[in-house]
């Protein structure tokens, strides 16, 4: 009963106009309303898609505001739901407009004549359904193209609108102490004023203070440990350096808007910083201090070159009411310039480790040093050999990464480029001086910090099957000490209580550069992939517009009594077929009958007082 009522309503829709035969007048719908709606709707969708794409392409990347980025990162499922819902909605609107464009085109052709099979194929296309008819390959291909295009719209919008991880690079520029400046040449009075001038915190006092001296040996141990395969960190003035300081002093990033009000050396952005994202770090190219070191075991005595003279005697030191015997070990050498270098240590066990350092000059006139590490007792080398090293302090440029907890310095040239100019004599001598002192700082009558630590590294790496030689580890130890000296010198010269009051002159500084990396969520232009994402949605929109325009130019309007006819509605199709003159077109449901009947051409018309499909002969 319900079906009969629906059929009657559909038939009524087809014949709702006045009896035009009696009046002889046919009224048509306005021409511009339906195509204008389709064109404007799809045009807005195209503008949204390509406008968004153009904005991302023009800017390269568009990060989300910080709050939105953090919210999206912390709620990934919500982000996916919102983007997918929005993409599905836009896709649904586009598909609806496409369906309406095809529907109105079918109506236009039904005002003239259209084969039943073409009508059926058109209905399938408007419904975005695959056409499976081997005898109509062209329709199969056409239907397949539109099916895939409309199916891909949701994926197209999702790919376009989903915020992904983007990395924004902001150029940075700053100032730091330049160890190559004339202030660090021994030929200038400025160097001696810095080294041992009247300032309470001159470089010598600072480096020999109890707040700095322990870090010298610790930095060497950390460097050797890292080379041996152990995780090691140097913590100095609140900063953590991975393995070694690299001779660099950390720079501090200050927003360019505040840089003019900040004293001292700092780094600021040369372009506006993006909104703070989910991760922020910086990378700078900075100047550091390191050393080119080469060590080997040598049997040294008073007759070798260099000569090494050893002397030991016992002294009694009263501890309470008891005289305790201690051994005094004295080791000396004669430098090429005739200077005698002597190191004496007091030990309760006659197990000592001393260093002797002589300055020499290589063929290029650069400061080079001979370092002799002489051990006694458990610290002696194979067969009593000493470690003899050649050390050339060098100023090296590093890529310094300020990411996470640690400051990581990677030399721009690794291994060290031998063409790099050695450090000025002043800086080199400071490094050599501190290296000679570090063995004394860590040694007393009952303990030898350097010797015990290095012995533990030797033993540990051999136990774990590593193959670094002891001389190689001594090279890393020396290098670690020298690199820390560079960091400490730079720190003191920029410290507010240092000899320069925290305000070094411009002649002692140079410009450094780098980038700030802001990792956030947003949209980033991809030259290869980004345009491809827009193909499905663009194809459907353009096709809808072209279909609407084509249909518009093919007719002068649709008769009003047929304007509400929807070929996608099966009830309306049944009403049109039963009310019209197609009763004998399909006498059965066999394939042959349907195929033959599909060749029949029909149009929307009137038979007697009923409106429906009329066969066109």
Image (cartoon, rainbow, N blue to C red):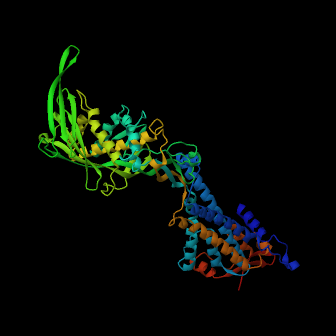
Name of the residue lying farthest toward the right: 23
Q: From what the image shows, is residue 338 above or below residue 445?
A: below
* In-image side of 610 versus 138 (left or right): right
What residue lies at 23% left-to-right and 42% top-to-bottom? Answer: 461
Residue 320 appears at what percent x and percent y? 23, 15
On the picture, is 87 further left or further right than 172?
A: right
Q: Is residue 462 left or right of residue 595?
A: left
Count the numbered circles shown: 0
349 above or below 238? above
Q: Report which quarter residue 145 is drawn in.
A: bottom right
Q: Is residue 183 visible?
A: yes
* Closest to the observer, 572 or 142: 142
Residue found at the very far top of the displayed protein: 321
Q: Position of residue 73 (x, y in %)?
A: 53, 48
The quadrant the N terminus occupies is bottom right
Instruction: Name the residue at 70% across, 76% down.
Output: 549
Q: Residue 466, can we see it?
A: no
Q: Position of residue 609 (x, y in %)?
A: 81, 76
Q: Quadrant of residue 562?
A: bottom right
Quarter of the rendering occupied by the C terminus: bottom right
Q: Residue at x 58, y 58 (%)?
A: 161
**Residue 58 x %, y %:** 58, 63
> Quadrant of residue 314 in the image?
top left
Vertical placement of residue 19 versus 304, above or below = below
Q: Which sits in the foreground, 589 or 514?
A: 514
């Amino acid at each position: 009963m319900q079906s009969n009522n629906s059929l009657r309503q559909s038939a009524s829709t087809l014949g709702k106009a006045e009896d035009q035969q009696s009046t002889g007048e046919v009224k048509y719908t306005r021409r511009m309303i339906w195509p204008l709606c389709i064109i404007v709707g799809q045009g807005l969708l195209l503008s949204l898609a390509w406008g968004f794409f153009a904005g991302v392409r023009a800017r390269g990347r568009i990060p989300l505001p910080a709050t939105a980025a953090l919210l999206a990162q912390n709620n990934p499922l919500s982000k996916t739901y919102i983007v997918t819902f929005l993409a599905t909605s836009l896709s649904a609107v586009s598909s609806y407009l496409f369906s309406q464009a095809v529907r109105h085109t079918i109506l236009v052709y039904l005002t003239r004549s259209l084969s039943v099979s073409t009508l059926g194929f058109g209905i399938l296309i408007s419904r975005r359904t695959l056409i499976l008819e081997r005898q109509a390959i062209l329709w199969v291909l056409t239907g397949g193209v539109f099916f895939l295009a409309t199916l891909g719209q949701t994926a197209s919008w999702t790919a376009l609108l989903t915020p992904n991880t983007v990395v924004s690079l902001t150029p940075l520029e700053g100032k730091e102490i330049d160890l190559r400046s004339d202030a660090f040449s021994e030929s200038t009075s400025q160097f001696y004023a810095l080294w041992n001038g009247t300032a309470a915190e001159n470089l010598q006092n600072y480096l020999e203070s109890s707040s700095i001296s322990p870090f010298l040996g610790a930095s060497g141990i950390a460097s050797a440990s890292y080379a041996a395969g152990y995780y090691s960190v140097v913590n100095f003035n609140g900063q953590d350096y991975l393995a070694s300081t690299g001779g660099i002093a950390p720079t501090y990033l200050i927003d360019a808007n505040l840089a003019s009000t900040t004293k001292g050396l700092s780094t600021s952005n040369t372009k506006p910083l993006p909104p703070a994202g989910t991760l922020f770090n910086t990378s700078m190219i900075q100047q550091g201090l390191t050393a080119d070191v080469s060590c080997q075991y040598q049997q040294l005595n008073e007759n070798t070159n260099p000569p090494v003279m050893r002397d030991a005697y016992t002294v009694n030191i009263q501890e309470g009411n008891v005289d305790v015997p201690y051994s005094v070990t004295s080791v000396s050498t004669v430098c090429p310039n005739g200077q005698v270098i002597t190191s004496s240590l007091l030990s309760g066990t006659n197990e000592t480790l001393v260093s002797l350092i002589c300055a020499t000059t290589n063929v290029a006139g650069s400061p080079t040093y001979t370092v002799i590490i002489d051990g006694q007792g458990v610290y002696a080398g194979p067969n009593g050999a000493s470690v003899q090293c050649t050390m050339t302090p060098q100023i090296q440029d590093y890529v310094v990464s300020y990411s996470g907890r640690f400051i990581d310095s990677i030399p721009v040239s690794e291994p060290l480029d031998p063409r790099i100019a050695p450090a000025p004599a002043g800086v080199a001598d400071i490094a050599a001086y501190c290296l000679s002192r570090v063995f004394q700082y860590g040694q007393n009558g009952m303990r030898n910090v350097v010797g015990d630590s290095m012995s533990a590294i030797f033993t540990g790496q051999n136990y774990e099957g590593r193959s670094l030689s002891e001389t190689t580890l001594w090279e890393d130890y020396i290098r670690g000490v020298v690199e820390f000296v560079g960091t400490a010198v730079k720190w003191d010269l920029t410290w507010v209580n240092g000899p320069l009051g925290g305000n070094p002159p411009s002649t002692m500084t140079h410009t450094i550069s780098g980038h700030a990396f802001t990792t956030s969520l947003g949209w980033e232009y991809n030259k290869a992939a980004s345009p491809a994402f827009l193909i499905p949605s663009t194809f459907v929109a353009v096709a809808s517009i072209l279909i609407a325009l084509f249909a518009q130019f093919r007719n002068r309007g649709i008769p009003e009594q047929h304007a509400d006819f929807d070929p996608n509605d099966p009830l309306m199709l049944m009403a049109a077929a039963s009310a019209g003159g197609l009763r004998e077109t399909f006498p059965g449901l066999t394939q042959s009958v349907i195929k033959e009947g599909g060749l029949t051409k029909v149009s929307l018309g009137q038979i007697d007082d009923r409106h429906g499909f009329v066969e066109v002969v």
